[in-house]
Image: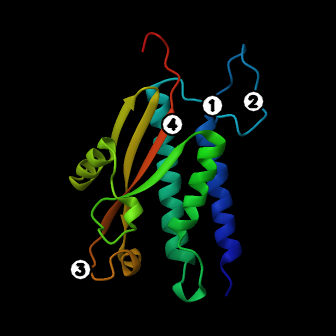
C-alpha cells in the first residue's frame, strides 16, 4: 500500500497550521497597518506572551505531525525519508517565509544525528532542563524569543535513533523554536 499521498497530506496540513500559528491566526490586524498579502513577510509577535503562545502551538503541531506520520505511515522497507528529515525541509521553508527558526536537538538519545548536538548556551541550558523533565525552556534576548520543548522518541523511533539501546523506555529529543518579537518601549 502506498502511503506517500497520506504523508504529503499530513505535511500539507502541518504547513497550514504552522502558517496560521506563526501569522497569529484569529487576530485581526491593527487598523493602521495594511493586511500583508505576501506570505513571505513575517509578522513578528508583539509580546513575549504572544510569542510563547505561538511557539507552544507550533511545538504541538510539529510534535503531533512527527508522531503520527512516523508511527502510522513510515515504514523502513518502503524507502521513504524519515519524518524528522522531511520536517527539516518544512523548517527551512519556515525560516525563509516566516523568519521562524526551528531546530532539533538531542537530549537523551545520543545516537541521534550529530547535527542535533546542543551548540549555544541556550541549547545547552535547554538540554539540561528537558533532561530534568521540564515541559519547556525559554529565553527572550535581543528581540528573539526562544523556546525548547520535548519531543518523545518512543520504542518505534528508537529502532533507528538508538539502535544499540538496552531498554525500550522512551527517550527525549528537543525542538527549538525561535521567532522575532517586536517589543514596545514599555517591555
Q: Secondary structure at mark 3?
A: loop
Q: Pointer 3 and pointer 1: residues touching (CB < 8 Å)?
A: no
Mark positioned earlier in the residue sequence (2 or 1):
2
**Label 3, on which residue?**
167
Residue 185 percent across, percent down from the top left: 47, 10
Q: Secondary structure at mark 4?
A: strand
101 relative to 130 in the view: left or right: right
- 97 lies above or below 182: below
**Label 4, on which residue?**
179
Mark positioned earlier in the residue sequence (3 or 1):
1
Q: Pointer 2 and pointer 1: residues touching (CB < 8 Å)?
A: yes
Work out how far the residue at label 3 is from the one at label 1, CA to CA, in angstroms: 44 Å
Residue 116 percent across, percent down from the top left: 39, 60
The crowding category of the residue bearing disc 2, from other C-alpha atoms within 10 Å (few below 14, some 14 to 19, many at least 20), is few
**Label 1, on which residue?**
43
Residue for point 65% across, 79% down: 3
Q: Nearer the viewer, mark 4 or mark 3?
A: 4
Residue for point 52% across, 55% down: 62
**Label 2, on which residue?**
36
Work out how far the residue at label 4 is from the one at label 3, CA to CA, in angstroms: 37 Å
Mark positioned earlier in the residue sequence (1 or 4):
1
Amino acid at each position: 500500500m502506498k502511503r506517500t499521498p497520506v504523508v504529503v497530506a499530513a505535511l500539507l496540513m502541518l504547513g497550514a497550521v504552522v502558517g496560521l500559528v506563526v501569522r497569529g491566526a484569529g487576530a485581526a490586524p491593527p487598523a493602521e497597518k495594511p493586511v500583508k498579502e505576501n506570505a513571505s513577510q513575517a509578522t513578528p509577535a508583539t509580546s513575549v506572551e504572544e510569542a510563547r503562545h505561538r511557539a507552544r502551538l507550533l511545538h504541538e503541531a510539529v510534535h503531533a505531525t512527527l508522531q503520527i506520520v512516523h508511527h502510522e505511515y513510515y515504514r523502513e522497507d518502503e524507502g521513504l525519508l524519515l519524518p524528522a528529515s522531511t520536517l527539516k525541509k518544512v523548517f527551512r521553508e519556515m525560516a525563509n517565509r516566516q523568519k521562524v527558526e526551528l531546530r532539533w536537538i538531542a537530549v537523551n538519545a545520543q545516537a541521534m544525528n550529530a547535527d542535533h548536538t546542543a551548540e549555544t548556551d541556550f541549547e545547552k541550558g535547554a538540554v539540561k532542563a528537558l533532561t530534568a523533565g521540564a515541559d519547556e525552556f525559554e529565553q527572550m534576548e535581543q528581540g528573539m524569543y526562544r523556546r525548547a520543548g520535548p519531543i518523545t522518541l518512543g520504542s518505534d523511533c528508537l529502532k533507528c535513533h538508538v539502535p544499540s539501546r538496552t531498554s525500550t523506555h522512551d527517550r527525549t529529543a528537543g525542538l527549538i523554536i525561535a521567532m522575532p518579537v517586536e517589543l514596545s518601549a514599555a517591555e
